[in-house]
Amino acid sequence: MSGFQPVDSLNSPRFVGVPTFMRLPQAQPGDELDVAIIGVPCDSGSPFRAGSRFGPNAVRQMSLMLRPISPYRDHINVFEALRIADAGDANVVPGYLMESLEMAEAALSAIAGQGIVPLALGGDHSISLPAIRAVAKRHGPVSLVHFDSHADTWDSYFGGKRHSAGTPFRRATEEGILDPSTSIQIGMRGSLFRPDDVSQSTALGFQVIDTDAALALGPQALAERIAARVGGNPVYITYDLDFVDPAFAPGVGTPEAGGPTAREALAILRAMTPMTIVGCDVVETNPGFDGPGQITALLAATVALELLSLIAVSR
Ligand code: MN
Ligand code: MN
């Protein structure tokens, strides 16, 4: 069993203590980890609602509800399979997106450079670019598995601004650190600014499966599509909580009506099959807009645990 174990919630109740993700130990320099949880509390890339700077700690708080064993994956104990610790947060400068993205890249590179898989908690979706840069330095260009109601492949915002929550995957494609021909975007829906808002993704080479198509396929067939698309390449999984219907995930930066339920969204993750995951993130949790009971933060924490479970069965 790994030495990196959560506080035992059967002996110490979950409301006691300083909440790291799932009550894991805080990472120390030199720890030999498989996965590091890292908050990236940057919301300076939000084109609409700011506030996801408070996402990482909201997710940590609700992650206290989670338990280590997954009944969806042959009862694997995630913390017996993987050495995981909470690496705290990247530092940021509020209002200074470029500086914040540089600081995030440095923090994520320190993790990825040791061969540790970063699981980043956002923050808005702009943070995926420094995360992909960090893992690509170690592993080369990645295949992206992207859950979101938006494609986030816009060229620019607000008069040529090239960095925002709406542009990370265009930038990563341009930088050659993401291979769109082996990448897949799932969940796009809703009204558009321009007719090509989604088709510009397919023009870049991404495969796009919109919300209607994803739900029509069902979890198993969709998981097969994902596996076929990424093959044996290094994979980066990015999960924008606005993939889920705002009835189940109201606390997000850019809500989009008509998405999957929490149950449908989790069923897709639980159907996904082993792949070479080199990094992942769960972004856009915005607790200031969350519903009673912190349902978005709870779902974000649950998504993060499903990603850890998938990494565990992939080893
Ligand atoms: Mn997004
Ligand atoms: Mn989105």
Image (cartoon, rainbow, N blue to C red):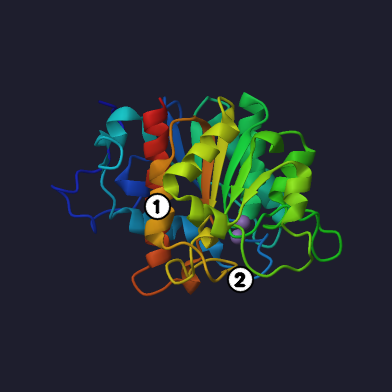
Q: Quadrant of residue 86?
A: top left
| Badge count | 2
Nearest the eye: 52 or 66: 66
Is the shortest distance between ligand 2 and the CB of mark 1 under 8 Å? no
Secondary structure, mark 1, is: helix
Q: Which residue corresponds to mark 2?
A: 49
Q: From the viewer's perspective, is 187 left or right of 84?
A: right
Q: Amino acid at mark 1?
A: Leu
* Residue positioned 62% across, 34% down in the render: 143
| Farthest residue, direction front | 216
For residue 150, above or below residue 26: below
The quadrant the N terminus occupies is: top left
**x and y, in percent, of residue 141 in the image:** 68, 30
Q: Nearer the viewer, mark 1 or mark 2?
A: 1
Q: Quadrant of residue 295?
A: bottom left
**x and y, in percent, of residue 30 in the image:** 45, 25
* Residue positioned 65% across, 56% down in the render: 93
* Residue positioned 47% across, 43% down in the render: 221
Let me know if residue 214 appears in the view.
Answer: yes
Let me know if residue 106 appears in the view.
Answer: no
Q: Residues within 10 Å of mark 1 (few under 14, many from 20)?
A: some
Nearest the eye: 82 or 146: 146
Which callout, 1 or 2, points at the residue further toward the start of the chain? 2
Mark number for residue 129? none
For residue 228, above or below residue 68: above
Q: Which residue corresponds to mark 1?
A: 266
Quadrant hosting ligand 2: bottom right
